Image: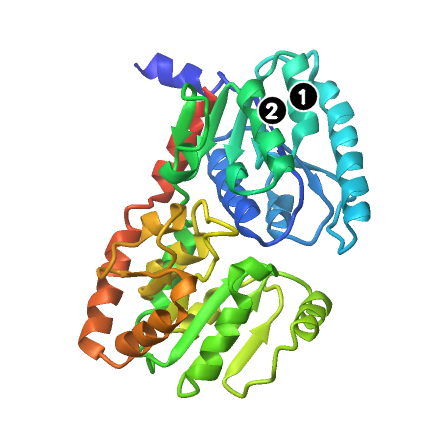
Amino acid sequence: MRYIAFLKLFVVMKIVCFHLFNDYSGSPKVLNMVLHGLSDKNYQIDLITSQKGGVLDEQLKNNNIRIFRYHYKYSVSLVKTTFRYLFSQLYTFLFSFRYLFKKDVVFFVNTLLPLGPALAGWLMRKKIIYYYHENAFTKGYFYRILAFMMQHLADKIICVSNFQSSFLHRKEGILVVPNALSVEFYQKCNEISLHEKDYKTILMLSSLKRYKGILEFVQLAQCLSQYRFLLVINDTKANIDSFLAHYKVPYLSNLEIWDRQSEVLPFYDRSSLVLNLSDKYAFIETFGLTILEAISAGIPVIVPTVGGVSELVEDGVNGYKIDIQDLNKIKNMIVHILSNPVLYHSLSQNAKMVSLKYDYFSMINKIESALQ
């Protein structure tokens, strides 16, 4: 057995990881944790991603990881974004052939978007593992095409929730591995939950999309002036200001709006309730990393009734499931939770217990098994 365990270290000599855009959104955050975990197991990894400016920059000092970069960023112009995307796929397609004559190489494709290297890996007969974070079947035709290609190119597909995997036509080679949080994050959560809170601050972390419920969050702040509201949007201040101006969002004294943050724990530290207001008719969450972060800090949550994010919540145990279409019910539930200390304490304690199901080391070990 010791001999087998020793040989296992040499089964995969090189992991080649492709991720399109290095920012602070959910998929690169999860990838960053996975890279840390695999490098701790002495895997040698090449990471190919966009320029500096995101969470993957943490790997710069990792001796087991080499980083290769290209220029890519989002733009409000669809034409610019499309051109940049096509260029990045051509570049990574050609870049991938540097591994043509290298044995024991696995292509680890994070999200659906890196199609170029997946095609190159398939042509070279490399093992291809997709780390599938989206739900293409609730998006447009472009994502559905990418999902179709993934199901034909991948040796294995790692999904982050049962809800997400249920949409795939392919049933073999599918592995469900729920996301987890880093050990360091859990430790910090324990530290911030030691002191009492005022039970009067509501937090939402979101991308700058209309269907994420930003305007509804503002409506709640207008209706519930007795509470403070924190909104952290994963985008630049300029883009956020443009969005707010476009939708004529009023200034509210009880509402703070923050741009992209590299450290979100201080916001959980200030908060007593976390919301996810995604519109299930326009977008369905495949997991909900911010909700896992919240319950790990002992913060009750309100989430939609469907999607991977709903799998994190036991209704009435660690939070509640209410759709954004019933905004008045969400408003009343906020008041109910924050005005009832006994209920709040029960939800908070249960939130911590539920979060323990999402274990970091279990996640890393399951992903490692997919690589073998």
Q: Is residue 14 above or below residue 340?
A: above
Say which residue appears at 47% left-offset and 80% top-offset. 221
Against 362, residue 198 (above or below) is below
Q: Is residue 121 above or below residue 214?
A: above
Return the mark for residue 149.
2
Residue type at tag 1: Leu
52, 176: nearer the viewer: 176
Residue lying at 61% horizontally and 41% vertically, measured from the top left: 140
- Applied colour scheme: rainbow
Foreground mark, 2 or 1, reads 2
Residue contact at pointers 2 and 1, CB within 8 angstroms: yes
* Above/below status of 12 relative to 277: above
Residue 326 drawn at (x, y percent): 38, 66
- Residue density around tag 2, few if under 14, some if 14–19, many if 20 or more, within 10 Å: some
Give the quarter of the image for residue 226: bottom left
Local SS, label 1: helix
Q: Is residue 133 visible?
A: no
Q: Earlier in the sequence, mark 2 or mark 1?
A: 1
Residue 121: x, y in percent? Answer: 65, 19
- In what quadrant of the picture does the N terminus appear? top left
Between the residue at mark 2 and the residue at mark 1, the CA separation in whole angstroms equals 9 Å
Q: In the visual, does 304 lie left or right of 155? A: left
Tag 2: amino acid:
Met
Query: Residue sitting at 52 percent across and 52 percent down?
Result: 282
Q: Which mark is residue 119?
A: 1
Element class at badge 2: helix
Please provide percent x and percent y for residue 363.
39, 37
